[in-house]
Every structure is written in structure tokens, then in C-alpha cells.
Amino acid sequence: MVRFLRAFLVFQLVGNVFSNLCLSAEDTFPSKPITVIVPFAAGGGSDVFVRIFQDSIRRNKLCPQPIVVKNISGAGGTIGSRIAREAEPDGHTILCLHDGIYTAQHYGNADWGPTDFEPIAATGQSGVVIAVSKNSPFQSLTELMDDSILRPYQLVFGTNLGAPNHYSAMFLQKGKEGSKFRFTQTGGGAKRLAQLKGGHVDVTGFSLSEYEQFKAAGIRALAVMSEEREPAYPNLPTAKEQGINAEHGLMQFWWAPRGTPPDRIAYLENLLRRAMNTETIRERLDFLHINPLFIVGDELQKTVQQRSANLNGITIEKPTSLPPLHWLILGMTIICGAFVLMERKKV
């Protein structure tokens, strides 16, 4: 009996130690790699932005676990954001997505938005450049907007429908009463550049970093939609300076699935703060013409609400649905066939 009791106590002690170790492992965060979902293809602006942070965190050993970038592109970023929203809310899967999280919901491309996530931080802001082909007759944004009033729906604005660059154009329309563009789906920055150079669209918008990359390819900037002139382009006037009451830009946000514990949000916030303080990130964001702002806490909540509210005054004019051509063609074929049969019977 004594031996049995001793064995029982030993087993109980070992069990308690093992249980405590397991609990300790669960409480330790992060206990595995942190996956950052980028809802766009590799090599794009959002992907480059996240990989700058990934590299800085790795080089400076800011996190005991690696940061893994997972590109899930498609449907203007909504496929990746949906997967992030449905991820386990344990802090090990997060999302980096700019204002597309607002515009997709407002346009109707997604039935989820900022309130379905826990905001972690905003870590950068970039202006928007309105550009035309170098052969364009428009020498200023004022001339272009005046023409969009005289000839409504004639100027073609290349966009990614429902994405932030589409909303840049709609902010322009709102800022100049009576102006109307005809929007066409072109896709990402490289595709918009090709459409602009090929003469398929009259005007489009680029982020500052995109414009810096594309400007030598035969395009010309008319305005920047920032509140003030961008330091990198001091001679480029703002839209407001040209009489168009429009302002728009891109802000990069980091999100966690709704229900992620506050202490893990705080850890991720602190991780991003420490990364932002590194010289590597400061230099690379400056090179990309991204303002290295850092917003968290109550200010972040207000920023999220404000940027969402800014879209309330935007009126969406979706293209008229085309008639069911395949059924019309089938009907005409049947009618023609009937006429042929009737004529044959007469013969």
C-alpha cells in the first residue's frame, strides 16, 4: 500500500508538472510563426510594404518567432481579407490591408469591413497622383475636370472597380460639381499604366511609389490628392490648388480577427512600434514616398471610423446590366428557324 501511494504521488506530481508546462506554452505568445496575410499578389505595393517589416523584424531579432508573408490575391483583396476574418483569433494570423477594407464594403464587393476585425496599428500613408499620357491634351487637372463637365461620361478613367484608386476618381467627381467620368476595369498599377500608354484610358491614378516607378514610361502627372504638396514633388500642385475640392490617399492598416485577446493585440502593436523605430524601415519607407506615421489606441479607433465615414458622401453609379444576349440570340435563332420551315412548307 505504501509503495502504491508513493507511486500515485509521483504520477500526480509528474502530471501536474506536465500540465503546468502545457499551460505555460499556451500562455506564451507567439508560440508559432506569425502569418501576415497580404490579399494581393507578390511583388505589388502592399506585398513590398509588408516584406519591409518582415525583413526589419528578422534582422533586428524583434520577435522570437518568424514572420511569414502569405499572399492570397483575387477579387480586389476580398478573398484574402475573408480568410483573415475567419482565421483563429489567437494573434498568429493577421492581415495587412489599406483603405481597400473600407471601399470593398462600401462598393458592395464584400459584406464585411473594419468592424469585423481588431485594428492593431496604422503604419504608413501615401498620396495619390492623377496622371495622363504624355501625349494627352490636358495640361492641368482643371482642364481635365472642365472637359469631364462639358462631355460627361466621355473621359475614360482606368480603375480597379471598388478599390481605393476607383474612389480617388469618385472623390474627384464629388469635388467638382457636374463632372462625370466613365470608369473601366483595368486592374493593378502595371495594368493601368499599360492601358494609359496604349490610349485605352484617358486618365488614371497611381500611388506615389507607383508613379515614381512609372513616370519614365511616358506618363505625366496633373495633380496630387494630398492635403499639401508632396515633398518629393514640390512642383506638382494639389487638386485643391486647382479648384477641385478633393483629397484622398492610402493608409496601411494591420488587422487581427475579431475576438483576438487584448494582450496579444498589445504585443503585435509593440512589435510594429519597435520595427517602425528601426533605421531600415525609416529609410525604405522614405524611398517609397510613404509617410511613416504610427497610429494606435484611441487615435487609431477614431481614424478607422473617420476614414469609413468619409465614404458616406460618395455616390456609386454602377454600370447598367447588359441584356441576356445569349437568350436573345437563341430566341432569334428559333424564330428564324421557324420562318425557314414555314417557307419550305409553302414550296
Image (cartoon, grey):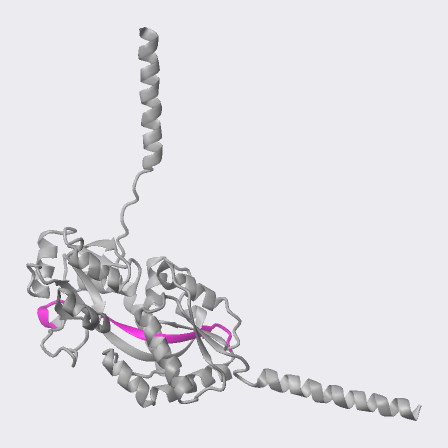
- Residue 156 seen from this side: yes
Let me know if residue 251 is in the magenta part.
Answer: yes
| Side of 170 where 113 appears, left or right | right
Residue 36, given in percent of the width and then of the height, sits at 43, 74
Q: Residue sitting at 28 percent across and 62 percent down?
A: 188
Q: Which of these two is toward me, 194 or 341? A: 194
Quadrant, the C terminus: top left
250 w.r.t. 24: above or below: above
Let me know if residue 304 is in the magenta part.
Answer: no
Farthest right residue in view: 1
- Residue 112 seen from this side: no
Quadrant, the N terminus: bottom right
Across the whole image, how many numbered discs are drawn on residues? 0
Q: Which of these two is toward me, 165 or 116? A: 165
Q: Quadrant of residue 303?
A: bottom left
Q: Residue sitting at 33 percent across and 12 percent down?
A: 342
148 w.r.t. 323: above or below: below
| Side of 88 where 337 appears, left or right | left
Q: Which residues are magenta?
A: 241-260
Residue 313, given in percent of the width and then of the height, sits at 26, 63
Q: Residue sitting at 19 percent across and 61 percent down?
A: 204
Q: Quadrant of residue 159?
A: bottom left
Q: Quadrant of residue 256?
A: bottom left
Q: Which of these two is toward me, 229 or 285? A: 285
